[in-house]
């Protein structure tokens, strides 16, 4: 099987898993389940759950308890997209090739959909206690990482500085802070949770976090590159959104060529660190390298 075929197969497996973890549309509040599903099953690269699963396997994990965490991670990522698209934030009309939630369900429901996805992510992750009660300690540790990396010391913290910096000239240091928190934190959480649940050692978990930080930074810089180089048809969301929102990016800071070089350097550093940790994992290494030239 080629890398592309293997990737596609894994995406399909993750989509089936997400379908299983979508809440039933029932009760007077069924509109919220409908809006959650509209977003969760809208496609997307499924990168975060895939990274989590690959790292889990890398350290020998082979149990079901990873699944609720994979679903929870995609729910948190999806909530952040729903809220980021709101009129009060980026005010975007398209996401993953579909009309954004506030345009389909109204702004009030879009706020609630983000809230619901965030809360349901934790309800979902905590079902791991029922699947593997004997692993309660590592499940608790994984929940700690999930909440911290999504919160004020992670993604939300990064988004706060991003919002506050809009239209302002910021330093490269501030830009790095934003990228490490806004984007890298969830990628770190995904990979670290895979390692924690597979009971990797403390040193291994630290190394995975460092690898993930590099990947997260490279991923955001590539997002900046795509915002100026791609098309809205390929991306499924508007292009030139950074310019519209008056945001400084790596492309405006360093220029397109240097931004691309940095994506490549950071990704290759991450892969060589991964090889020193586990020389044999072909798919994960290829997945990380494929992100350098990703087109969406
Ligand atoms: C609103 C609390 C709050 C946070 C929003 C993560 C974020 C912060 C906003 C989303 C917009 C954005 C540019 C985020 C940076 C990370 C990023 C590039 C997200 C898009 O992730 P992909 O490319 O999306 O993995 P798919 O659709 O493929 O899952």
Image (tube, rainbow, N blue to C red):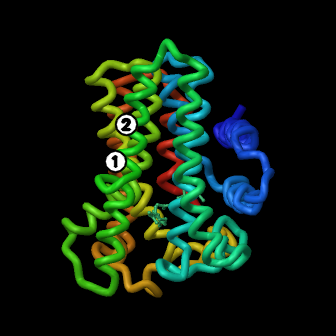
Left or right of residue 189: residue 232 = right
Q: Residue 280, image x and y in percent?
A: 47, 21
Q: Which residue is mark 2?
A: 144
Marks 1/2 in contact by CB < 8 Å: the verdict is no
Specify which label sits upstream in the sequence, 1 or 2.
2
Circle 2 — which element? helix
Q: Residue at x 45, y 69 (%)?
A: 225
Q: Residue at x 74, y 38 (%)?
A: 20
Q: Residue 286, image x and y in percent?
A: 53, 38
At label 2, counting other C-alpha atoms closer than 10 Å, the crowd grade (few under 14, some 14-19, many 20 or more) is: few
Residue 140: quarter of image: top left
Task: Give 84 or 240, whichever is nearer the viewer.
Answer: 84
Task: Give 165 or 172, whichever is nearer the viewer.
Answer: 165
Q: Residue 154, image x and y in percent?
A: 34, 53
One can see residue 141 in this view:
yes
Q: Residue at x 55, y 73 (%)?
A: 85
Q: Residue 81, image x and y in percent?
A: 55, 64
User: Within 8 Å of ligand 1, the CB of disc 1?
Assistant: no
Query: Dividing the image into 4 quarters, which one contains the C terminus?
Result: bottom right
Query: In the figure, 162 relative to 176: above or below?
Result: below
One can see residue 240 in this view:
no
Residue found at the far front of this picture: 28
- Mark pair 1, 2: CA separation: 22 Å
Query: In the figure, 118 relative to 10: above or below?
Result: below
At label 1, counting other C-alpha atoms closer than 10 Å, the crowd grade (few under 14, some 14-19, many 20 or more) is: many
């Amino acid at each position: 099987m080629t890398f592309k075929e293997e990737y596609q197969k894994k995406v399909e497996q993750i989509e089936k898993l997400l379908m299983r973890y979508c809440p039933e549309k029932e009760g007077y509040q069924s509109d919220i389940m409908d809006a959650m599903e509209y977003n969760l099953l809208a496609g997307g690269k499924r990168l975060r759950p895939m990274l989590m699963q690959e790292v889990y396997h890398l350290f020998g994990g082979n149990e079901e308890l990873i699944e609720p965490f994979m679903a929870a991670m995609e729910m948190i990522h999806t909530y952040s997209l729903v809220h980021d698209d709101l009129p009060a934030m980026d005010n975007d009309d398209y996401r993953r090739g579909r009309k954004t939630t506030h345009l389909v369900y109204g702004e009030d429901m879009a706020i609630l959909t983000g809230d619901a996805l965030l809360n349901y992510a934790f309800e979902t992750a905590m079902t791991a206690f029922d699947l593997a009660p004997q692993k309660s300690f590592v499940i608790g540790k994984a929940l700690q990482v999930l909440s911290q990396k999504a919160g004020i010391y992670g993604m939300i913290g990064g988004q706060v500085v991003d919002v506050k910096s809009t239209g302002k000239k910021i330093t490269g240091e501030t830009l790095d802070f934003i990228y490490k928190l806004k984007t890298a934190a969830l990628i770190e959480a995904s990979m670290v949770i895979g390692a924690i649940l597979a009971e990797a050692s403390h040193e291994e978990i630290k190394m995975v976090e460092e690898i993930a930080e590099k990947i997260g930074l490279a991923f955001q810089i590539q997002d900046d590159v795509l915002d100026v180089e791609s098309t809205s048809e390929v991306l499924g969301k508007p292009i030139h959104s950074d310019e519209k929102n008056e945001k400084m990016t790596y492309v405006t800071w360093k220029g397109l060529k240097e931004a691309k070089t940095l994506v490549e350097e950071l990704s290759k550093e991450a892969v060589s660190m991964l090889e020193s940790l586990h020389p044999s994992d072909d798919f994960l290494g290829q997945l990380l390298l494929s992100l350098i030239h990703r087109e969406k």
